[in-house]
Amino acid sequence: MKDHRCYQPLDRMRDLVRNNSELILVMGRFGISLGFGEKSVREVCRMHHVDEKTFLAVVNYITGRDYHYEEVSLPSLIRYLKQSHEYFLDFNLPNIRRKLIESIDCSGTNDIAMLIIRFYDEYVMAVRKHMDYEDEVIFAYVEQLSQGHLKRNYTISEFASKHAPIGDKLKELKDVIIRCYPEKNNYLLNAALLEIISCEQDMTSHCLIEDNLFVPAVKLIEQQLREKGATTYADKTDKDVPDRKDKLEALSDREKDVIACVTKGMSNKEIAEELYLSVHTVATHRRNISNKLQIHTTAGLTIYAIANKLVNIEELQVG
């Protein structure tokens, strides 16, 4: 029977890792090295200057045990989250790309292979934007809170309301590969798929830690500052924080229809006939779409449409 009790400071660190292999990544993101022998969680955390309560909150949350966000040190948790961002952007995602390139035909003659790589590159760009925003805006906001300053007309709840999972599109990529790339006995591709699945799970866990540990801990600080009557401030980035919209939300319904037609290989004239528009109007829509999304090729729009479910994979026209 599995033990669901909370991990405690005096538990041996090696027991945590032995029972939960995913915690090896967690330790790395806290800057904890291996080779800790029989030392306890407390001893190992002190050796590496890690806040033990924050470490245990993350560990207990990830392993499905009771956790206490009230005891989290936000500076320590933010360091962990930033290290997670570096892991994904500088190691994990580039490594998956290398494995994809090794396992599929990227000579330029295989349309599906090229779409897979472009799909992946679009995804990585979106992840980088997501994580850069947290690093540069959200964590900076929390730093101001730690100094006793409340931001005018903004709370962490606004970030939480727009904080979407960033691993879901990897499921789409996995589905594209499984359904659209016919090649037998491709062990390299199978290995890349397993990496993609593992990354998707890791990304999902990362986002849930932000939702269930980081956000509640920030809310607690906001509440404490309000109760103390802390002064509020406004700065030039105020307009950037609450009002950032996903690019998909910025598209009109008609523009989404145009994208769907483009991915089906239709010309401007055919799109005009399909949607009862003039050719000039279709061209205008396409320019607006390119400006909004900063995507300027049919292949790029196809990847975007699949990722955002504007078309079904079965409608993809290649070759």
Image: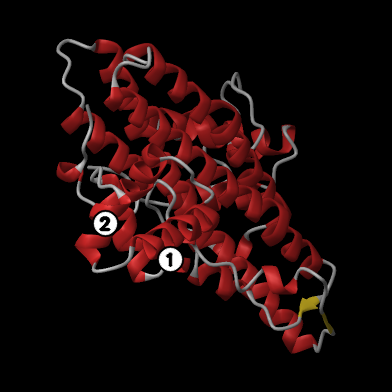
Q: Secondary structure at mark 1?
A: loop
Asked if residue 284 lies left or right of residue 189, the reply is right
When the figure is inspected, residue 80 is found, relative to residue 113, above or below; the finding is below
Where does residue 238 sit, x and y in percent of width and height? Answer: 74, 73
Q: Amino acid at mark 1?
A: Leu
Q: Which residue is mark 1?
A: 251
When the figure is inspected, residue 148 is found, relative to residue 298, above or below; the finding is below
Q: Which residue is mark 2?
A: 271
Of tags 2 and 1, the one toward the viewer is 2
Determine if residue 12 is in view.
no
Q: 153 or 280: which is nearer to us?
A: 280
Q: 85 or 133: which is nearer to us?
A: 133
Instruction: Write the residue at 53% across / 41% down.
Output: 125
Where does residue 108 sit, x and y in percent of width and height? Answer: 37, 17
Where does residue 297 sit, x and y in percent of width and height? Answer: 44, 40
Instruction: Write the residue at 46% across / 18% down.
Output: 98
